Every structure is written in structure tokens, then in C-alpha cells.
Image (tube, rainbow, N blue to C red):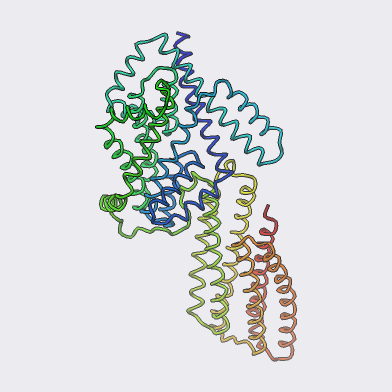
Amino acid sequence: MWEELTIAFNIIGGLALFMYGVTLLRETLGKISGKRVVRILEKVSNNPVKGMGAGTAATFMTQSSSITVLTLIGFVNAGMMTFRQSVNVMLGSEIGTTVTAQLVSFDIGMAFWPLVAIGFFMKMFSKNEKIQLTGTVIFSLGLLFLAMDFMKMGGEDLTSDYPFFRTLINEYGANPIVGIMIGALIAGVTQSSSATTSLVIAMGRAGAIDLGPGIALVMGANIGTCFLELFAAIGATSPAKRTAMAQTMINVVGVVIFLPFLGSFTDLVKLTDPDLTNIPRQLANAHTIFNVIVSLIFIPFVGLLVRFCEKLIPDKKGEVIGRHYFDDEMLHLPQAALLESERETLRTAEKTIEMITLSKTALLKKDLEDARKVMNLEEEVDERCRSTEDFIDKIREEELNHEDTIWRIKLLAILTDIERVGDLASNIAEFVLDKLKNGITFSQQGTDDITEMFELVEETYTTAINSLKTRNKDLAKVAERLEDQVDVLERRLKASHVERVRRGICDPQADTVFVETLRNLERIGDHADNIAYDVIMDT
């Protein structure tokens, strides 16, 4: 009984350790190159070859085709990427996911222990984040090879103590359809084609499985990994559902194409390695060749696939796409989620700049229509700020590097400033109603003073937002200096107004509207100063 448990724990425990190692590696690579992945994906064009290159690079850097596809679903859901572009990237992700299999197919002997030790001590005893992250990558690689060794030991014990299991596995695997179904089932349960493929490679190294049945299992793993994407598409927009459907069709059709030629394909794979007995290397090569060929086959048919999916999943009437720059599926790649939160913040800030401009014309020209526009925009700004704050709260800090963690906190503070600016602009718009209702008018000097204050505050706030957009600290310092001028001007204009009222030049009824407008504009300057400070102190 104990012997059977040891075998089971070696195989299942090794698989669990492998999945943990892959997760740790993915999260660490995300901290190192997550922003680069997002920028690669965002620059994707309709060119299939360039899209494939982007997908390959992105999946190589994230070590997960599922994360790449889920991020694509998020981009499509947010209206940042077209469905066709996502299909191009998807073809590349199929290639990028083969890197892990190629890596673990090497037999490094006991060298995984030095990798684990070196990586651990680099992470534990260095205060430099880059060295810590590098150490975590090395440690993760050590875990992957250690896990492969555990699974191999379990496979060896299984075949030596219970030889009928090897016969059973290979007899079932000799039927390609059964092998494919088993591979899909394992990948569906583990939610990882890499883990399933690596388990098959480990069994190959242990002599527990032959090449032909192993290839069938690996092909099935490609199908099984689609379950997560299909589940993620539930409740998503129509384009996002099409993205998940296209991923499934690519893998299923690819397997169907290869199925009649599996014997010939197995013979071809044997030729890829001089050592005809090196099953692990041959399985990894089969995985790579299969995915590369399937992706190349689909390039000329991308348009056809897109049209088929669009017909299969038509647009929903009244469906809103791209309301925000983010979508919850982006949370699978926290760096993408943070970057898109920043862009949504900037998008909201542009609305508040518009509100300041409209509130000026509304107040000075008694334009009721512009005042209403400001109030409507204030509701939109509040909704955008709340939604973005809620989304940022969902981003997992533990998967961000130190710089991104600090920036996440700053974004929340900046959103508060932006929301308050919207409220202050709305306050000014409400003063228009008082002016119209009570017949309040400003003197010419009062109008000139308010105009001067508006222009300086507009310049200050716009400069602060531009510094945020470009992360330009020099520009942020300019905004801070302008805000100092706002404070001085507010005091001077208030004193001038009091003097005009005393001399009977200004209508006393205008006092509250004039003074409160100055106060609201000065507070907008304060929030601009807060934003500029966050940019300057960005670390």
C-alpha cells in the first residue's frame, strides 16, 4: 500500500510542484516584462505574420498561452483590439507555449539542486529587486526540473513494479482518439497544457509511454487548455466570445487535420533527434512542430475563420463595447490591468479638462447649455472614477514589482483628485443657475479677473495632466510653480473684489458667486498640485 502511495505522490505531487513552479515563473516574468508584453500586444496590426510574432513573444515572456488569450479577450472586450487582430496573436501564442516543453525535455541530472539553492539565496539575501527577481526565475526553473524528476521517478516505479500499466497506457494511447481525449481531460483539469505536456514528457523519460501515444496526449492537451478561455468568455461581449471560440476551433481543427496522418507524423518526429530513443526530446519537438504547422496553415484562412465566428456568434443588439479601457480578463496579467487603469484615468482626466473649459463659458456667457453639459459630464466622471478605482482594487499587488505597486497606490490617489476636480467644475456650473435665476452680473473688471483666474487654472491643471500622461517630472514641476501663482492670484483677486464691492463698482449680490468661483478654481489648482507631486515622487 505504501509503495503505491509513494508512486502516486511522486507523480501527482511532482505535477503539483511543476504547476507551482510554472505559476511562480509566470508571475516573476510578469513583474520583469509584463509592461513590454502589453505594449507588444497593443501594437498589433491586421498583419497576420506580425500578429503571430507578437503572440509568440508575449507567450514566451508570460510562459502561458492561457494568460495571453485571456488578456486578448480582455482587450477585445474593452474595444482596444479587433477580433481579427486577436486571432492573429492567438496563432502566435500557440507557438510560444511550446517553449516550456522544449526546456523541460532536457535531462540536467541533479543540476536542479544548484538552481534551487542559487535562486533561493539570491532572492532571500539581496535587497536589490532585480537580483531578487532573477533569483526567483532561477529558483522556478530549478523547481520545474525537480518536479520533472519526481514525475519521472514515479513513472519508473510504476512501469517496473506494475508493467501491465505501461501496456495499458500504450494500448489505450495507440488509439489516437482515446489518447487525445485523455490529454484534453488532464489539461482541462489542470488548466495547463504545459503541465500536461511536461507530465507526458516525464512519463516518456521514465519509459512509461511510447512516442505515438505520447503525441496523441500532447495534441489533446492543446484542446483541453481551451476550456478556461471558453469559461472566461461567458458573459463577455460578442467579439470576446468569438475570440475564445476561435482559439478552440484552431486547436480542434488542427488536431483533426493531423489525426489521419498521425503515424507518418510520428515517423517524421523521430527524425528530429539523432538519438531515436530520446522520447522526451521527440515529444517536445512534436509539440513544437504541431503548433507551428497548425498556425502556418491558418494564416491564409484567418479571414474565413473570422467571418465564420462572426456568423456563429452575431452582435447583440444594444451591446456596449469599449465603455472603459479595461476589462476584468486583463486581471490575469496585472501589468496590463495597471497600464489600462492608467489610460482610463487619463481618459477621465481629459473629461475634467473639458468640464473646466465649459464651466468658464457657462459662467462668463451665462450659457445654460454648457452648464448642463458640465453637470452631465460630472456624472460620467464620477462613474468612470468609481469603476476604475474598483478595478484597481482587484489588481493583485503580489504580482506587481515594487515600482508598479507604488504606482497602483498613486493612481488611486490621482483618481480622487480627478473626481474632485469634476465636482468643483460642476459647482461652478451650478453658479450659472444662480446668476440666471437672480439676475446676477459681474462688472467688467470682475469678468476680466475671473477670466484670468480660469486661464491660469486651466493651464495649471492641463500641465499637471500632461505630466501624468508623459511621466515628465520637469513638466510636473512647472505645474507646481503655476499652482503657486494660482494661490497668489486668488488672494489678489479676492482683495480687488472686496474693494470694488466697497466702492459700489460690483453688485453685492455677485459676492458669493464671485468668491466661491475663485475658491473652487483655487482648489482645482490644489488638486493639480497633488497630481504633479505624485508624478515627481514616482519611484
Nearest to the observer: residue 258 or residue 146:
258
Q: Quadrant of residue 283?
A: top left
**Relative to 80, 30 lies left or right:** right
The relative height of residue 525 versus residue 294 in the rendered view (above or below) is below
Q: Residue at x 67, y 38 (%)?
A: 131
- Identify the residue at image location x=44%, y=27%: 281
In this picture, residue 442 sits left or right of residue 344 = right
Q: Nearer the viewer, residue 88 or 477?
A: 88
Where residue 46 sits: x, y (%)? 38, 56
* Residue drawn at point x = 36 percent, y = 26 percent: 270
> Would residue 196 be found to the left or right of residue 302 on screen?
right
Quadrant for the N terminus in the image: top left
Against 279, residue 71 (above or below) is below
- Up-down: is 299 above or below 419? above
Where is residue 33 drawn, in percent x and y?
56, 45
State the residue in front, 342 or 526: 342
Residue at 54%, 83% (x, y): give it.
Answer: 366
Percent from the top left, x then y, of residue 154? Answer: 46, 16
| Above/below status of 419 relative to 438 | above
Along the line of sight, the residue nearer the viewer: 467 or 174: 174
Residue 251, position in %: x, y?
A: 33, 39
